[in-house]
Amino acid sequence: MITGATLIGSRDLSTTATFRAVDPSRGIEMEPAFSDAGPAEVDIATRLAAEAFPIYRATVPEQRAAFLDLIALKVEDVGDALIERATQETGLPTARLEGERSRTTSQLRLFANWVRAGGADEPRLDSPLPQRTPLPRADLRQRHIGIGPVAVFGASNFPLAFSVAGGDTASALAAGCPVIVKGHPAHPGTSELVGRAVRDAVAASGLPEGVFSLLTGRSNELGGALVADPRISAVGFTGSRAGGLALMKIATARPVPIPVYAEMSSINPVFLLPGALRARAEALAAGFVASLTLGAGQFCTNPGLVIALAGEDVDRFIAAAGARVSGASAATMLTPGIAGAYAKGISALEASPGVTEVARGGEGGPNGCRPSLFVADADLFMTAPVLAHEVFGASSLVIRCADEDEMRAVAHALEGQLTATLHLEPSDHDLAASLLPVLEDKAGRILANGWPTGVEVCHAMVHGGPFPATSDPRSTSVGTLAIRRFLRPVCYQDLPEDLLPPAVRTRNPLHLPRLVDGAVDLPTEPRS
Ligand code: NAP
């Protein structure tokens, strides 16, 4: 049931100030009114989280894994009501949201299995060398522990998979950290339904109430107070560059600065190499426009930049892509604010001298996104920074390069990206090999002959990259490696066996895989 309360531990709190969700496809406000939490609510939630932390982080892997599995089950138990509300609040189609729900629950289960297998503890043991000369070596054992309570900012464009029980929350809980979610004000009802599911799982698992809270609100003051609170140890954020930078500023100005893992903006360059373009310009155009217009282009991996050599092959691509963009209809964007920002970004491109509009899609409802395609030459791209700004939505810019050197120069000129894509044939491998080292420096994920939208949740995924794609290029916000963001290593030197945590005891009572004297040591007994 959706009440509009903010969920702090096991309590439902209401504030005098309220706000409402907007149905973006109709442009009207929805019931009920939601509490507009502020610093007072932050104070209660962070106090409860701090109290819960020592108890929650002492849970053994199997307990945390069972808790994550239970959250997945409770989210599924919400049933159709969740999809119906999310559809109304976001304008996203039902099938997309059903897919996103299953991504959310399978992510929780993947993380549960990873925790169960010792992936969060990552124990390492170095045996003592008492006879070593000139100095003996002590007995050294390392494991990872949760960093402390984590603030999570739900993303507008993934109301389930990057929101209340999404990737950041799953990572932090897997790491043994209590979580306080600042719900995105664009989907407060969806957030409450999922928040109640997580809260039920906390109670049913016998965990302290402060392990999870959901703060509803739409003021910067709320998010700012959360990040500034001394009991918060780290932040997970997905959204705008301005929002991420504002939170990083608050985090670094604290008496005790904390890490902010912000995923912000990326235009995901796609390089169409000459052999591929010659062989299949029209097929590339079809794949490109499908990726560009998916979800009204509201993906951080949307292909916002296409780079190719000038000539008749790229002209074929532009003509075919333009025809498809012209035939595409407008899709509802997530919020009036996002639709407004898209319109502003398109106007900036239209007003840029040297940028030519190739095509615009059809007009749509109140917050419709008309797909857009532009073209410009590489020398202009490298001197006009506005052309490299993310336009969040279904807009892309084709850059024509005079030759391969100019293509490499464009690659060098790029900011940090989540992804970089190469479309290639065997005849393109030399050019691709010369681009690869540059792209490795620029992007978290490099694809060949695919499209960047669609991010697999698995062990090898990197959904990260150098600034401004993220605030910390050493991390990922998707996949099991995301858990590391909220862990820190502790080394135990010469501690008596009975004082050591179970993960690093000699007998290996948790049956975890461990690195012992530099070699992988797999448990011989099954995990209980
Ligand atoms: P946003 O404006 O960055 O907001 C995301 C969250 O951060 C919201 O909960 C917001 O809360 C909070 N926030 C933002 N600025 C803050 C500040 N200065 N202090 C404290 N909290 C702050 O993102 P959005 O609402 O999802 O969309 C706006 C734009 O972000 C889009 O047009 C797009 O350009 C970009 N975006 C990018 C991605 C991506 O994946 N790269 C995804 C989504 C959006 P309140 O506003 O309620 O205070």
Image: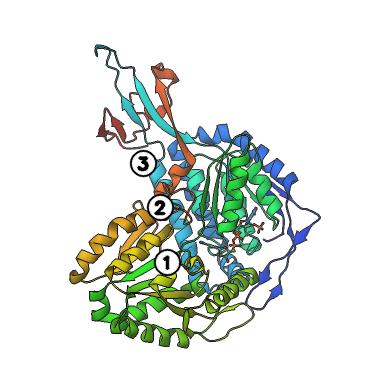
Q: Which residue is mark 2?
A: 479
Q: Hey, which quadrant is residue 254 in on the image?
A: top right
Quadrant in the picture for residue 462: bottom left
What amino acid is found at the position of numbered circle 2 in the picture?
Gly
Location of residue 280 with respect to 446 vertically, above or below: below
Q: CA distance from mark 1 to mark 3?
A: 48 Å
The structure residue drawn at horizontal position 55% and vertical position 64%, both measured from the top left corner, is: 79
Report how far apart the C-alphas of labels 1 and 2 lie in the structure: 34 Å
Quadrant holding the N terminus: bottom right
Q: Residues within 10 Å of mark 2 (few under 14, many from 20)?
A: many
Residue that mark 3 sits on: 117
Compare residues 522 and 236 and report the one nearer the observer: 236
For disc 1, the marked residue is 382
- Sequence order check, earlier mark of 1 and 3: 3
Residue 436 coordinates in the image, percent (x, y): 28, 59
For mark 3, does the 10 Å Cα neighbourhood hold few (<14), some (14 to 19), or many (20 or more) residues? Answer: some
SS state under label 3: loop
Residues at discs 2 and 3 in contact (Cβ within 8 Å): no
Mark nearest the camera among 1 and 3 is 1
